[in-house]
Amino acid sequence: MMHSENIISLYSRKILAQVCFQAEKHRLSLRPCEGEALPETANIECYKDLSEFTAGQRIEVEVIEMNSANGNSYFYSY
C-alpha cells in the first residue's frame, strides 16, 4: 500500500528563506527569514538543488504547508 503526503494549504506563498548548513545531516537546508509569516525555526523541505548556494544566502522560494503520514506538518518548496 502506498502512502502519500497530504496538502494542508491549497495556496503556495513566496517567502524569503535563508540557506543553512545542517551539520548533523551534512547538507544544506532552508529556514524562513525573520519577518516572514512562518516561524524562523520551521524546516522547509526543498526539491531544489541547494548546492549552488552558500550557507547564509537568502533566496526567494514558494512554499506550501504539507502534512506527513505521522500527522506532523512541515513546509515544502518546489
Image (cartoon, rainbow, N blue to C red):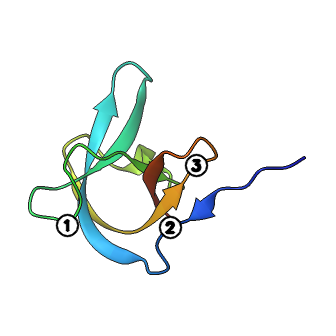
Q: Report helix, strand or loop for mark 2.
A: loop
Indicate which label's residue lies in the foreground, 1 or 2.
2
**What residue sits 54% from the left and 46% below the top?**
71
- How packed mark 1 is, by other alpha carbons closer than 10 Å (few <14, some 14-19, many 20 or more), is few
Q: Report helix, strand or loop for mark 3.
A: loop
**What residue sits 44% from the left and 23% below the top?**
25
The extreme top residue here reads 24
Q: Report helix, strand or loop for mark 1.
A: loop
Nearer to us in this view, 8 or 39? 8
Nearer to us in this view, 52 or 5? 5
Disc number at residue 37? 1
Percent across and percent down for residue 43 are 35, 45
Answer left or right for 32 relative to 69: left
User: As shown in the figure, which amino acid type bears the numbered disc 2?
Assistant: Ile
Tags 2 and 3 touching, CB below 8 Å: no
Q: Tag 2 or tag 1, which sits nearer the N-term?
A: 2
**What residue sits 31% from the left and 32% below the top?**
21
User: As shown in the figure, which amino acid type bears the numbered disc 1?
Assistant: Ala
Which residue is disc 2 drawn over? 8
- How packed mark 3 is, by other alpha carbons closer than 10 Å (few <14, some 14-19, many 20 or more), is some
